[in-house]
Image: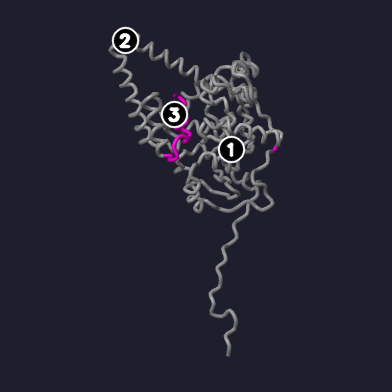
Amino acid sequence: MGQEPGLGEPKPVSNPSPRLFTWDEIWFRTAQGDPHREKWLVIDRKVCDVSQFIRRHPGGSRIINSHIGQDATDAFVAFHMDKRLVRKFFNSLLIGELAPDQPSSEPSKNASWLQHDLGHLSVFKKSEWNHFLHKFVMCHLIGASAKWWTLLHSQHHAKPNCFSKDPDIDVHPFLFALGKKLAVEVSKSVSVEINNLYNGEDYACLHRIPAVVSWCQEAARCPSYKGFSLSSLWQDLAWMLTFYIRFLLIYGSLLEVKSLLAFYLLFRMMESTWFVWVSQMNHIPMDIDYDNNLDWVSTQLHATCNVNQSLFNDWFTGHLNFQIEHHLFPTMPRHNYWKVAPLVKSLCAKHGLKYQCKPLLTAFADILQ
């Protein structure tokens, strides 16, 4: 008797179909505002549960938290240089995929620059070299924490000008509120006496002051962030100590204590004033709002503008006059921004997106308006 076809042959093992999700279900399960919400996000249409991984994320938990319940594909691509390496973590995080009828992203519902370049991993191909030299320049040459800068600046790039998610504008309620919408919210929460003195319009006017104080607030919070380990804190402090030792060795024998302190405060004041005006002229005049869950390109264009290109402007701003391109491609070397700018402009024109570019003095004046 002949063997019945197929008998004795191993049956092919079929992989179980992935669980399919809709954006409504993802939004419901992540339930913004619920302390017990799931921590899901979407990358390349794959739904990932980062509830456990978020504590081990090298970039800290805050930047992932800003994309919970949203599509994080563009942010993932923008912030990670070695995509193959980080994708190895995916299998343990995957819980399903977006259903075929779901859109890929949820539709909207109604020399100081050297440390900046190193912090964005845009100098060397190997991130280890960028991190090491960023720590050297930031801590030893400038006297500030590299880890603190990395955590806060990455969060700023992920959600620029978004209340409670962008540390650069998070200066309320201790000093002032940026933008009219936040001003109204703050005015509702203060006492009746304060409301009588400072109404919503009064608070809105205070957005004219550059948001430098936010860095002081966030510096105090950094040690509590996931990703800011105690060992990295001590490493930064040790590196920073070498800056002050070098400063005292160079100037200690030349100046008296009062003059030395005055000199230190003077150059810090000049440095911070220049840096805040240069960095915030591209942001403060733009829309400041809650996170409306826009796509990556729209998020950056709503919160950034450019300053006209010239030899002086490129030098004075460290090529951050191309702020739009810098935010769209944060790991791109800054001397290439002018090359990609025409492509970004044509993309904006094609899709009806506003691409703002203005003279340098106009950009400064807009901060005060």
Secondary structure found at label 2: loop
Name the residue tied to disc 2: 255
Mark 2 in CB contact with mark 1 (< 8 angstroms): no
Callout 1, which amino acid? Gly
Q: Which residues are magenta?
A: 109-127
Q: Let me know if residue 318 is in the magenta part.
A: no
Q: Residue at x 34, y 9 (%)?
A: 258
Q: Let me know if residue 110 is in the magenta part.
A: yes
The answer to whether one can see residue 192 in this image is no
Callout 3, which amino acid? Gln
Quadrant hosting residue 348: top right
Please provide percent x and percent y for residue 107: 68, 41
* Cα distance in 3D space between marks 2 and 3: 29 Å
Name the residue tied to disc 3: 115
Label whose residue precedes the other's in the sequence (3 or 1):
1
Callout 2, which amino acid? Leu
Could you say which is closer to the camera, residue 214 or residue 132? 132
Secondary structure found at label 1: loop
Name the residue tied to disc 1: 33
